[in-house]
Amino acid sequence: MSTATTGVRLYKLGPADQIPLGEGRAFAISDHQVAVFRLRDGQIRALSAVCPHRGGPLADGLTDSQQVICPLHNHAFRLIDGHCTTGAPSVQAYHVRVDNGELVLHLHAQLDP
């Protein structure tokens, strides 16, 4: 489900607790694959779900409080902004929040055809 507000679409992804602490899950949003991570301290982060190096599934990667490591070739991406610290191209970071226990992803209109 989405609602539009000033060039941003909001997508409700379901309950936050569907993602165990310290793990990620991939979601198909419009034409985008988005990996949502629930960090061990309860923070939520979201990045493009596909590693640009060789298409690795970032939602399956290992995370700590600052980065996710692609499970295929160990490229590391900062969870805050998607910047790759190991030489691969960076990935898109998305704003995601928890509202009344539900995950809400913000997708800018220019990214959503």
Image (spheres, rainbow, N blue to C red):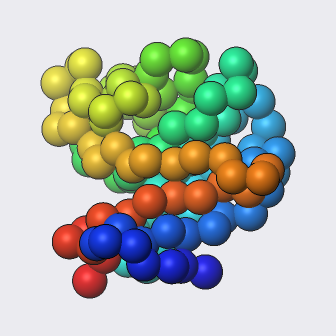
Q: Quadrant of residue 60?
A: top right
Quadrant for the N terminus in the image: bottom right
- Give the tally of numbered discs: 0
Q: Nearer the viewer, residue 111 or 86?
A: 111
**In the drawing, does residue 97 fall left or right of residue 91?**
right
Q: Quadrant of residue 38?
A: top right
Q: Is residue 102 above or below residue 8?
A: above
In the displayed orientation, state which residue is furthest to the front. 6
**What percent of the width, then of the height, locates residue 69?**
45, 26
Q: Is residue 113 above or below residue 85?
A: below
- Residue at the spot 51% in from the left edge and 79% down from the top edge: 3
- Residue at the spot 82% in from the left edge and 45% down from the top edge: 17
Quadrant for the C terminus in the image: bottom left
**What percent of the width, then of the height, locates residue 77?**
35, 28
**What percent of the width, then of the height, locates residue 109?**
27, 73
Q: Is residue 53 above or below residue 26?
A: above
Residue 51 makes an appearance in the image: no
**In the drawing, does residue 2 fall left or right of residue 81?**
right
Residue 30 makes an appearance in the image: yes
- Residue at the spot 20% in from the left edge and 33% down from the top edge: 88
Q: Nearer the viewer, residue 91 or 81?
A: 81
**In the drawing, does residue 27 fall left or right of residue 69?**
right
Q: Nearer the viewer, residue 14 or 6?
A: 6
**In the drawing, does residue 113 fall left or right of residue 58?**
left
- Residue at the spot 45% in from the left edge and 22% down from the top edge: 67
Q: Quadrant of residue 83?
A: top left
